[in-house]
């Protein structure tokens, strides 16, 4: 899971590196705005993967194959409904990009060009979330590795072909990602089919019961609210950065790739925690559950330290690798110290997100995010708004720290009460 998640940021890194070496900063700023807008929408749908992993892992632990199938089908139906809604709302979403960003006309044009192509990958991208969650819940760690690695290889090859060789610019990067998403869907269906055969799960479509639908929707509702607040904070980084100028927007786009690299690596551990904690809860095994939490925190701390050292020593060279626009390089290097500290600050929130997904305690995740967004992001930013972009990165650091602290407090509380398995 760590290997597969480390490969995910290659999508953003290659997009940024390829576009970042074009003639002007507005190309890089445009793809940052367009890709961020798509990421907001698709990451809002991350509740599909999270809820699927948790409930599937618990069903596997209790050896209920009929429940496995019904939960999987319900999640697929929900994913397609959400995806079709996004495609239909495309005109309104594109108008919102222009109005909310406050960016220059050139930047908005490039962002809308990217968005208008990439939005049609929504059905594949959202179904892939469910299929990925199912594989994680079934403890099939190699499946997500194959899937993510395949997606990245296809995207990288097409990025280079469309942008560098064919010179399609931002549109080429969008087409590369769209084709990669649909290619991944074909592979994901193949891998899940093999899991159904291996575990002797009947492949037949039946409508879920009202009770199952209510339970899944309740779980998804709370995780959706949590994801919405998370993306609100990240989107604020992008859109407020746009108001500070295209150079700041482009520099933040480069630096956010550092954060994505950290998040997907630590999420590799968190995904494993989701499956192991969920399985332990399904078996009603408290000692095993607490063991996997301790192991996850240990390895999360190790990787956070390694990332901090990596950014401290090689961060400047990585920035220069991603872009050769002098003003963007200089601007990004000014804010690099924030990214050096963030792996250590953010480790707890990533790991305990995984723990609470496995426990299917979505309300706790929602409440933690509400508190952290209000008092960990927007309040610190309001107090340091005169710092401009430094204020944004300070707020992001406070936000990550408070998320981890609140989830750790809630986990400790559940341990003391003896209610972890409920």
Image: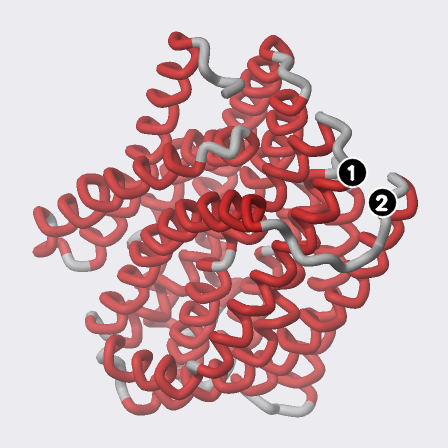
The percent position of residue 416, horizontal first and vertical second, equals 39, 8
Q: Which residue is mark 1?
A: 65
**Residue 264 can be seen in this image:** no
Question: For this rendering, which residue is in front, 134 or 294?
Answer: 134
The quadrant holding residue 387 is bottom left
Q: Which residue is mark 2?
A: 201
User: Which residue occupies 47% across, 71% down?
Assistant: 38
Side of 208 relative to 312 (left or right): right
Mark nearer the N terminus (1 vs 2): 1
The percent position of residue 235, horizontal first and vertical second, equals 33, 62
Q: Are marks 1 and 2 in contact (CB under 8 Å)?
A: yes
Residue 313 higher or lower than 101, as above or below? above
Q: Which residue lies most toward the front here?
A: 210
The percent position of residue 99, horizontal first and vertical second, equals 24, 82
Residue 109 higher or lower than 216, as above or below? below
Q: What is the crowding at mark 2: few (fewer than 14 residues within 10 Å), some, or many (at least 20)?
A: some
Residue 133 higher or lower than 128, as above or below? above
User: Which residue occupies 27% across, 69% down?
Assistant: 239
| SS assignment at label 2 | loop
User: Which residue occupies 54% across, 76% down?
Assistant: 84
Question: For this rendering, which residue is in front, 411 or 396?
Answer: 411
Side of 271 relative to 327 (left or right): right
């Amino acid at each position: 899971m760590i290997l597969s998640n480390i490969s995910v940021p290659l999508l953003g890194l290659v997009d940024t590196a390829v576009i970042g070496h074009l003639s002007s900063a507005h190309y890089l700023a445009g793809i940052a705005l367009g890709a961020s807008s798509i990421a907001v929408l698709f990451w809002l749908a991350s509740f599909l993967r999270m809820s699927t992993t948790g409930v599937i892992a618990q069903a596997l632990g209790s050896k209920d194959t009929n429940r496995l199938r019904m939960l999987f089908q319900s999640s697929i139906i929900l994913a397609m409904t959400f995806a079709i809604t996004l495609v239909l709302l495309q005109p309104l979403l594109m108008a919102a990009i222009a109005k909310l960003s406050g960016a220059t006309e050139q930047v908005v044009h490039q962002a809308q060009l990217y968005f208008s192509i990439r939005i049609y990958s929504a059905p594949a991208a959202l179904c892939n979330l469910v299929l990925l969650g199912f594989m994680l819940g079934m403890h099939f760690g190699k499946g997500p590795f194959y899937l993510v690695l395949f997606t990245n290889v296809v995207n990288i090859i097409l990025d280079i072909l469309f942008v560098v060789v064919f010179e399609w610019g931002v549109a080429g990067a969008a087409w590369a990602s769209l084709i990669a998403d649909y290619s991944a869907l074909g592979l994901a269906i193949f891998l899940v089919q093999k899991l159904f055969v291996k575990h002797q799960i009947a492949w037949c479509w039946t409508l879920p019961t009202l009770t199952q639908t209510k339970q899944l929707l309740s779980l998804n509702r709370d995780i959706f609210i949590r994801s919405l607040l998370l993306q609100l904070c990240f989107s604020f980084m992008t859109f407020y950065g746009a108001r500070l100028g295209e150079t700041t927007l482009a520099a933040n786009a480069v630096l956010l790739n550092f954060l994505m690299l950290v998040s997907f690596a630590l999420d590799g551990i968190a995904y494993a925690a989701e499956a192991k904690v969920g399985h332990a809860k399904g078996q009603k095994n408290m000692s095993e559950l607490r063991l996997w939490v301790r192991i996850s925190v240990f390895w999360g701390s190790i990787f956070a330290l390694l990332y901090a050292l990596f950014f401290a020593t090689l961060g400047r060279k990585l920035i220069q690798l991603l872009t050769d626009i002098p003003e963007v390089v200089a601007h990004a290097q000014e804010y690099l110290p924030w990214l050096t500290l963030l792996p250590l600050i953010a480790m707890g929130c990533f790991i305990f997100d995984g723990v609470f997904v496995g426990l299917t305690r979505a309300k706790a995740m929602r409440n933690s995010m509400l508190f952290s967004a209000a008092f960990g992001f927007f309040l610190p930013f309001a107090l340091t708004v005169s710092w401009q972009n430094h204020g944004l990165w300070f707020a992001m650091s406070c936000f990550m720290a408070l998320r981890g602290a609140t989830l750790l407090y809630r986990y400790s509380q559940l341990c003391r009460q003896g209610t972890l398995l409920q």
